[in-house]
Image (cartoon, helix red, strand yellow):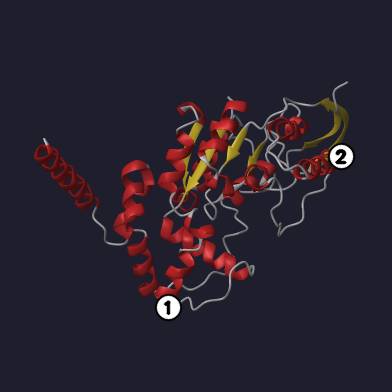
Amino acid sequence: MPALWPFKARNGNGRETEVEAFFQAGDPCPDFLCVGAQKAGTSWLYQQLEQHPDFWMPPVKELHYLDLLNKAKRFHPPRCGDERDTSFLEDMNNLGARFYLDLENYGRLFCRKGPLLSGDISPAYSTLSDEIIERVVNHFPNLKVVFLARDPVERAWSQLSMGMRLGMINRFDATDPEEVIRNLLNPGVLVRSHPSKVVARWKRYVRPENFRLYFFDDLKENPAELRRSILRFLGGDPDKPSGGLKPHDNNDAGREKLRLTAKVRDRMAQFFEQELKACASELGGRAKSWTSRYGFSLLLFFWDLLDDSIDLLFWCDWIC
């Protein structure tokens, strides 16, 4: 007999009210993954979906199952709203005790969504290997994938600020450009700082109609339209409110950050120059403006590519 869970409906004011009814478990699979990027609006997205009446989101934002088998250190307590939340957390803990990737039972975690939509928002999935991505996409062929891209300089600085605030990295002199570069070379920072490579890796396996790229720039400038676009892609109704949340509500926006000096900013831009140019040419959209923030000319980048191609032709001709 399929599992049944009590259902909580939201009224017009966004408040939950108990309903004397139960619904059957839904399909044993996530409808979508948000694979990053860290510090690019993933917490905002989780909050918007968690309060939306078309979605049932897991009681923790980042499951970390596909990258760490649920062995990540958590800084926020999970939601414990009803029986579904409790049973989800129990099953997730049992799943994390295994030392292999069990996609069958990972999918079963999401049967609690019933007739609603659900997914896993774990920015660390941007670091998954080709092998894991291929296995996940083959197992869940209808899976939709969202990636929120952010200017690599801004994103890395925000990650360093968070890391120092939470004690995840040792304190350092944030005004010393070379100390900052040493921290950027930390694998945990560096591997997340190349969105062009992340997008290319996921797009190798996800069907084009199931992959969407969005930009943190739009969250800053037009969050309502970004919310509308993402909800429409995921299958939710963008005209329904997310409880009492407004599109511009973002709990992370006011968190303390390290002061970024002009000298450090210029050095970081130099460090990420090639990635900034790669994002402009490969991601397009808002990424086209990232190079101009730091005085890099995209035209010169394309000229360098053309010059390299001409050199290669001459080299091939000489070999012949």
Q: Which residue is mark 2?
A: 83
All told, the count of numbered labels is 2
Q: The C terminus appears in which quarter of the rendering?
A: top left
Residue drawn at x 69%, y 29% as measured from the top left: 29
User: Residue 194 placed where, x, y %?
Assistant: 43, 51
Q: Earlier in the sequence, mark 1 or mark 2?
A: 2
Residue 176: which disc?
1
Q: Is residue 202 visible?
A: yes
User: Residue 140 placed where, x, y %?
Assistant: 62, 27
Q: The N terminus appears in which quarter of the rendering?
A: top right
Task: Work out how far the residue at label 1 is from the one at label 2, CA to CA, in angstroms.
Answer: 51 Å
Residue drawn at x 66%, y 47% as measured from the top left: 64
Amino acid type shown at disc 1: Asp
User: Residue 122 placed where, x, y %?
Assistant: 62, 46
Q: Nearer the viewer, mark 1 or mark 2?
A: 1
63 to the left or right of 3? left
Residue drawn at x 10%, y 42% as measured from the top left: 314
